[in-house]
Image: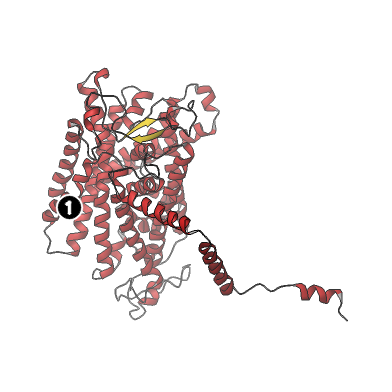
Amino acid sequence: MQTAGDAVVVGVEKAPPPRLKAAGNKVRAAVRFAHIPENERYTITTNMTRRTTQFIDVTAASGAQGKGASMFSAIISIAATCMGTGILALPGAYAEAGLFGGWALGILGACLACLAIFLLESAAMRAGLELPTMFDLCNAVLPGSGAFVSICLVVFVIGAALTYVIVAADNVTSTFPQIPRKVFLLASACYYVPLCFLRSMDSLRIVSLLSVSCLMLAVTTILSFYVAPSLLDPCGGQGVSDPPASSVFMSSPCKAACLDDPAGTCTSEIVLLGSTAQCFGKLPSFILAYFCVHNTFTILAELEEPTPVRKAKTVGLAMALIFSFYSIVATAGYLTFGSLVSSNVLNSYPADSVAVAAVRVALAVAVLSTVPLQAYPSRLNVVSVIEMCTKRKEERIGPQRSIKMTISSSLSTNLPATLATFSTVISLKEAPETEALGDSLFITSTLDRVAVLAYVSVVVGIALFVSDLGTVVDFLGSTSGDLIFLIVPSVTFILAGEKLRTAIRAPITWAAAALGLLGVAVMAKFLADKFV
């Protein structure tokens, strides 16, 4: 006789094993695809091929409708603008701030970057600027300040480009000593100088993708040194001293890889959280690691259908990608060597490692590919300043742009101009030369060409005769970079508000004020440490 309880037990079905369940999912997916009509399968394949071809063809916009940049293009452009050789210094920053401190500073840096970009976009909207530059925005909210901010920006990006070129030369010549330094500098200029004359950020998408891909190789290699020390020995045969009893990560791969030489000092203790002073001291490094506000105006403006939602998604996904790269490199490098990690993590690995040599070459390609990305904001601001000094206001044309604002049929006609979409045209402002510009991939204005020539001449000329700009770059980063990244977004957002009494009540205004005060504090600390 079967009881009710037995009936319940019999009615229960056992869940299939995980492997069987996964296999079943694959079968069901294959069955669903098999039931798609042949013409729809052809359409899917054709669309994928078309989108790939469209992305590769830099003579046209990368967006689905060909009216602007795709979100993917914008994301990799922002990522390539931010990421560079600074990624190699993050493990050393973790050594001072601690593991958890480093993660927290990385998240804070990404959040501050998002806030700065939001404040600049909002300030431009409040000021009624359709396609702003840093020069235009600063002059709109505080007349006369545009030239000063633009000069600071140009000096900063030239310093960054110089650093990239010098670091690339150092990496390649140290890997291949038979290559003369000046020969490499001149040869590499043949790669990035023509790209500086391209007219739009979207047309640099292949270069940006190449830069991000090379950095991905570096991320993968550094992670592999940590997770697979038996394949890639991070200590080069050195031993490792036993970590102190208080060490958290007692199973460091360096320890396992180097037990044959107990007298070595390949790794050391892992600190979870540094002191408040140490964390604040490393904050500028994490802030500058996300520095991209000088290019976001153009990148976001070139988006196809650049609505606020699409802009927010683009910035958020770009910051997530950057944070993931930074976190993997910094965590893996720090856990591998502990507090003994070098300020340049590659210097901690064996000098004769083939994997390290490949990373050095990849990094050289990555940073050289970002030099044209720094040329774009330099050109825009230099042209604006020159025109301000040499022409009357009504005669100014402005720098050449790749896009022109047009109202999309999918948007309401009463939307503000800053929510409009863009089509691939030459210049926002109507000028007599506009008709003659055609669909040129490169800039054609004489003034724009002169600005780019001046930029590349300074970069190449100084790089040929100077091999170390460490102190100068630190100073520029902590003054000009701090001004543009933290202080300018704060001040422009507050000054662009129409009613200060109403604005003071808004939480975003307080966030803007806090960002500006943080910028002042960081700059003051740097100057005090250097000169007091």
**Dot 1: element:** helix
Q: Choose between 31 and 202: the one closer to the eye.
A: 31
Location of residue 461 in the rendering, given as x and y in whole percent from the top left corner: 13, 44
Left or right: residue 527 compared with residue 47: left
Location of residue 351 in the rendering, given as x and y in whole percent from the top left corner: 24, 68
Q: Quadrant of the C terminus?
A: top left
Which residue is drawn at the image coordinates 24% and 61% (left, top)?
Answer: 361
- Residue 273 visible in image: no
Q: On screen, 320 above or below 295?
A: below
- Residue 381 visible in image: yes
What sort of colour scheme is used for the picture?
A: secondary structure
Q: On screen, 384 above or below 371?
A: above
Q: Choose between 55 and 81: the one closer to the eye.
A: 55
Left or right: residue 242 compared with residue 349: right
Location of residue 224 in the rendering, given as x and y in whole percent from the top left corner: 37, 68
Location of residue 491 in the rendering, given as x and y in whole percent from the top left corner: 41, 30
Amino acid of disc 1: Ser
Which residue is drawn at the image coordinates 45% and 73% (left, top)?
Answer: 251
The picture quadrant where one finds residue 486 is: top left
Could you classify mark 1 by the number of other residues whose Cα lies within 10 Å: few (under 14), some (14-19), or many (20 or more)?
A: some
Q: On screen, 531 above or below 140?
A: below
Q: From this viewpoint, which residue is outermost toward the right?
A: 1
The picture quadrant where one finds residue 87 is: bottom left
Q: Quadrant of the N terminus?
A: bottom right
| Label 1 sits on residue | 188
Left or right: residue 21 compared with residue 479: right
